[in-house]
Image (spheres, rainbow, N blue to C red):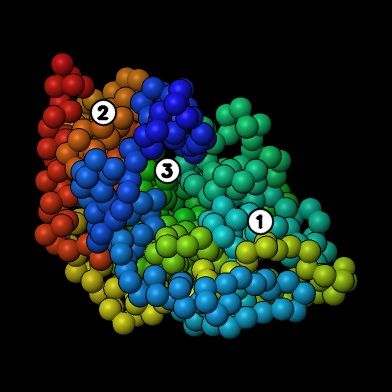
């Protein structure tokens, strides 16, 4: 250890392979080591405090240090620390959580399958879609639509769904039978003078043309986040989901709502599907299901999808899919307590209240010299950095402006996420109005400091 050094940062560089990190730069730069959290703030190993403007990774809805979740985990750990639900086995935390989720679903759902992450949930949904169509005697109806800039995970299949180039490059992705429709970003992709409604109509027409070109009998499903998260917090244009759902229904194509980020109050309703008028056949969720305290995710399926799985498992002799930790009792217990807190504290009403100052401060940043667009809903939003407001031209190279602002916000005690040149904000749902203003004050200071760096 002498040659490596004993600090956490030096040991990190020696032993940890980091996700979503420039590994070459990390060998020199090293990590920001976070030691503890309290409320909406986290503290590094030097004692510096940061407002966590991303709720970790879009997930710590109840903030850090929620004792009820700690106690729920401890109680379940003592009673039944681990068990599985394979082969007709079960346990009450898993049963209770499934029952609760079905009761809370935005549209009627039949059953819940549990996994451990959003990636696993969406990967499971892909397999279920293929299984479903085999059960219905439609072996050719297997292609799956996602969208450019959409994000659905990082497994081989879900990274293929994800419509971001760096999730494909040199991983030999995407795999076959994965298609990408156009991104519903009005600011970047609308024609000059095209209204949101006109843009939505064009996107629906393009989607239908794509389905017809592929052959409707070969297209099985479409995955969609109510609001795109890691692709830059893209809020779809008015009437978008109404119009694309009509197309999907016309050609008997399932809709999968990826609620991994939007679920559990983030958009001002319990589900993003409610905010956006989506009626999914399958719904995936994770992250805020346990306030990020333990890994757990869920896939809710309609009765039609479930019955097809029943028929196929009868033919085969088993439903040959599952994870060791599906419905892990401790994770399930923490998720149940999280849902109880949401209801007891009326978190959705709190989000609606505090979203007013959040969105006001966010939209005001559209006037900043570096900002081309400010967009968001509820307690999620982003600003897009541009070199020229009139032409929407990016700073060169793309991503540099985001990296500069990311570094300056961290220096000012705020953690955000730069996705290229879009700066995302997704704070814990329990944030107060005073903390919202503090967060935006720090972001504005960082943006002001970035002007001479980017234009100097």
Nearer the camera: disc 1 or disc 2: 2
Mark 3 or 1 closer to N-term? Answer: 1
Residue 367 appears in which quarter of the rendering? top left
Callout 3: 10 Å neighbours few (<14), some, many (20+)? some
Callout 1: 10 Å neighbours few (<14), some, many (20+)? many
Q: Position of residue 160 (x, y in %)?
A: 61, 42
Q: Position of residue 30 (x, y in %)?
A: 38, 30
Q: Is residue 72 visible?
A: yes
Instruction: Find the distance from the CA under tag 3 to the CA under tag 1.
Output: 20 Å
> In this image, 82 relative to 48: left or right?
right
Q: Considering the numbered disc 1 on the image, is that residue within a helix, a strand or a loop?
A: helix
Instruction: Find the distance from the CA under tag 1 to the CA under tag 2.
Output: 38 Å
Point 58% across, 77% down: residue: 80
Mark 3 or 2 closer to N-term? Answer: 3
Mark on residue 404? 2
Q: Nearer the viewer, residue 249 or 372?
A: 372
Q: Position of residue 307 (x, y in %)?
A: 73, 76
Q: Considering the numbered disc 3 on the image, is that residue within a helix, a strand or a loop?
A: loop
Q: Do the CB atoms of the residues marked 1 and 2 lie less than 8 Å apart?
A: no
Residue at the spot of label 1: 126
Residue 289 appears in which quarter of the rendering? bottom left
Mark on residue 244? none
Residue at the spot of label 3: 231
């Amino acid at each position: 250890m002498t040659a490596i050094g004993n600090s956490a940062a030096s040991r990190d560089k020696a032993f940890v392979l980091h996700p979503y990190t420039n590994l070459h730069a990390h060998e020199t730069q090293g990590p920001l080591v976070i030691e503890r959290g309290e409320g909406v703030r986290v503290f590094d190993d030097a004692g510096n405090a940061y407002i966590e403007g991303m709720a970790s990774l879009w997930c710590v809805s109840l903030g850090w240090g929620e004792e009820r979740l700690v106690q729920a985990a401890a109680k379940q750990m003592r009673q039944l620390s681990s068990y599985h639900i394979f082969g007709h086995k079960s346990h009450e935390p898993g049963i209770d959580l499934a029952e609760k989720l079905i009761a809370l679903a935005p549209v009627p759902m039949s059953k819940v399958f549990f996994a451990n992450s959003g990636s696993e949930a969406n990967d499971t949904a892909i397999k279920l879609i293929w299984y479903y169509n085999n059960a219905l005697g439609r072996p050719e109806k297997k292609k799956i639509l996602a969208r450019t800039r959409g994000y659905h995970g990082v497994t081989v299949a879900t990274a293929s769904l994800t419509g971001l180039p760096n999730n494909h490059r040199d991983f030999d992705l995407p795999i076959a039978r994965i298609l990408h429709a156009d991104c519903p970003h009005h600011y970047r992709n609308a024609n000059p003078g095209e209204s949101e409604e006109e843009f939505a109509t064009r996107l629906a027409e393009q989607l239908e043309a794509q389905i017809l070109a592929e052959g409707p009998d070969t297209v099985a499903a479409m995955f969609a986040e109510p609001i795109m998260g890691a692709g830059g917090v893209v809020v779809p244009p008015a009437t978008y989901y109404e119009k694309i759902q009509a197309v999907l229904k016309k050609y008997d194509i399932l809709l999968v709502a990826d609620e991994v980020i939007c679920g559990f109050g983030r958009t001002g309703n319990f589900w993003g599907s409610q905010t956006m008028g989506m009626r999914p056949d399958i719904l995936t969720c994770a992250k805020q299901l346990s306030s990020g305290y333990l890994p757990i995710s869920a896939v809710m399926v309609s009765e039609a999808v479930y019955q097809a799985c029943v028929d196929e498992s009868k033919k085969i002799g088993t439903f040959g899919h599952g994870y060791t930790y599906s419905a892990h009792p401790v994770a399930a217990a923490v998720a149940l307590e999280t849902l109880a807190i949401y209801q007891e504290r009326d978190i959705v009403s709190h989000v609606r209240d505090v979203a007013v100052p959040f969105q006001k401060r966010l939209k005001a940043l559209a006037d900043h010299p570096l900002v081309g667009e400010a967009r968001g809903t509820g307690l999620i939003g982003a600003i897009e950095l541009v070199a020229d407001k009139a032409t929407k031209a990016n700073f060169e190279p793309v991503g540099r402006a985001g990296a500069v602002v990311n570094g300056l916000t961290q220096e000012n005690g705020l953690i955000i996420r730069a996705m290229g040149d879009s700066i995302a904000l997704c704070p814990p749902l329990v944030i107060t109005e005073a903390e919202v203003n503090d967060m935006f004050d720090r972001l504005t200071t960082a943006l002001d400091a970035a002007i001479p760096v980017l234009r100097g």
